[in-house]
Structures are given as structure tokens and as C-alpha cells.
Image (cartoon, rainbow, N blue to C red):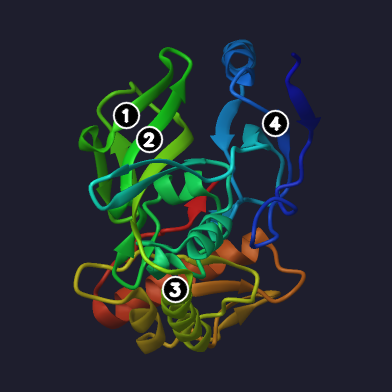
Amino acid sequence: MALELIKNPSLAERTSLNLGGTAEVEVVLRDARDLDELGNFLATHALRPFVIGEGSNLLAPDEHLDMALIRAATPPGPERVEKVDNKMIVRCGAAQRLPGLLGWAQMAGLSGMEGLTGIPGSVGGAVAMNAGSYGTEFGDVITRVRLWSPMQGLVWVDVSRCVFGYRHFSCTVTAGKALIWEVEIALTESSPKAVRSVMKDVYDKKKSTQPVTAKTAGCVFKNPVGHSAGMLLDEAGMKGVRLGGMAFSDIHANFLVNLGGGSSAHALELLEMGKIAVLENSGITLETEVILL
């Protein structure tokens, strides 16, 4: 089976901010058998590999990049594996969209992820960034992760050998970086109505305080310990500040919004303006949460 290769893929078409130039190639993985060929491809091409997922937390430059984007195209859907004590173990492919997983869990009456409602992206991205909101982190429900690397192939890693932190995931098993292929999570049996009620409350709160329908990459800065990055940006006068087609949201200052026709150059300039404004106003140095390619 030959790998599916897409030449000069558009990053603007593959990121939620709709920004960026092109990459050298996109490698599409249809099933686990493609992983061996991926290893051969990476060994014979001097390109920087990057698993793009749904592109919901990325800011790509406007120019061409010497990168090989990696995308899993046909993930296995969520499925029940077994019941352990009072928990239902669910297995899901990393390429599954996170909102799709939450919707499936709601219809199945399985609770534990409701706080993640409204977060875009893929399940693999949610693992890699330990996606979280409203007191819930994805790492809270994970029991094990299936990882692939050229040296070790596919291996299941128990959560006890993983490290989850604030927008952070790593493990002690694979040497170097690894591709997240599947994940197993433990959810509590509830009812579809009860899970839907909590998800609706979470979404309503987010809709009133965040630009959930705009073209964004989520929060662009990490929250410093004891502080809200959005509040710091607001106090520094950055809420609603616009440069070209890009702006800090006038709903929540920690969201960078593409108002139409935005450029990565303007986005990066706004990020730097925000960091300088906060440092001068509060003495705090913000760190980016959005991944800069």
C-alpha cells in the first residue's frame, strides 16, 4: 500500500485561524499499516515532521515550510472496551474530532468530559496539549495511550508512565517524539439527559465569555500561575486591539481572531504587542500556548 502524499498543502486551509502558507507535503495515514511506510518516508526525506490534527491550536507563518504534515484520515470511532469497577473503558482513534467524541459520550450516557465542551480539535491534539477547561483536563480520564515512533513501532503506554500537566503531555517509554495513535479513557455511566444538561451549561457559559464561533486558535497565551492571561491582556488595554485583519477578541482578550483577510505576520506582531503591554503593565511575561510553526 502506497502512502497518500499531497504536495504543497495549504496551511491556511488546515488551521482554524485560516492562516499560513504551504508545507512541502502532507502524508495521509489511512490505517496502522501505513505507519511502517511513514517511518521509511521520514528516514529518506529531510523534512521536519509535524502531526497537524485539526489545526486548532496552530499559528503558521505565511511562507513555505520544509515540513511534512502528518494526518490520520480514517480513525476508528469511539467504542466500549470493558467495564472496570464503576467505569466504562472507551477506546478512540487519535484522529477522531474531540467534539465528536463528546457527542458520542453524551448519547451513550457516559460522564467525565463535559467540561471540555466547546473545545475544537482532535482527540490526539487533546492528549498532546492535555486540553482542559472548567476544572476538567483530558488527562483526568485517560487510562492508556497508544503511541508510534519509528524506533519502537506501536506501543500501548499506561497512564502511570505518562506525565500530564498544564497543556503538557509526555511519557517515559518512547525516546523522543511519538505520534499519538489511539487512547483509552474511563468514563462514568450516567444518562444522556444528565450529560447533555451539563454540556449545555458549559457551552452557554463559554458562548457568553469566549468567541466560540469566530476563527481563532483558542487561547494564545498560557495562564501564569495565579493569574488569568485574558485579564492581564485586558488590563493592559489589548482587548479588541486590531492590526490588519487580525485582532484580540473584544469578548475575551486571550483569543486572537481572524476577522477576514488576516495574515500571520500581523498575528505574530499582535502577540508581541500583547506580551510587551502585559510586561510593562504588570511585570509578568506571558508564554504562548498556541503552537508557532
Q: Are marks 3 and 4 in contact (CB under 8 Å)?
A: no
Q: Are marks 2 and 4 in contact (CB under 8 Å)?
A: no
> Which of the numbered marks, if any, corresponds to residue 228?
none
Marks 4, 1: nearer the viewer: 1
Q: Position of residue 279 (x, y in %)?
A: 31, 73
Q: Position of residue 205 (x, y in %)?
A: 45, 85
Tell me if residue 14 comes above or below residue 275 in the rendering: above
Say whether disc 4 or disc 1 marks the residue closer to the N-terminus. Answer: 4
Say whether disc 2 or disc 1 marks the residue closer to the N-terminus. Answer: 2
Q: Are marks 1 and 3 in contact (CB under 8 Å)?
A: no
Say whether disc 2 or disc 4 marks the residue closer to the N-terminus. Answer: 4
| Residue identified by numbered label 4 | 28
What residue is shown at x 65% (from left), y 70% (from top)? 215
| Residue identified by numbered label 3 | 274
Marks 2, 4: nearer the viewer: 2
Q: Are marks 2 and 1 in contact (CB under 8 Å)?
A: yes
Residue 253 in view (yes/no)? no
| Residue identified by numbered label 2 | 145
State the separation of the CA atoms marked 3 and 2: 36 Å
Secondary structure, mark 2, is strand
State the separation of the CA atoms marked 1 and 3: 39 Å
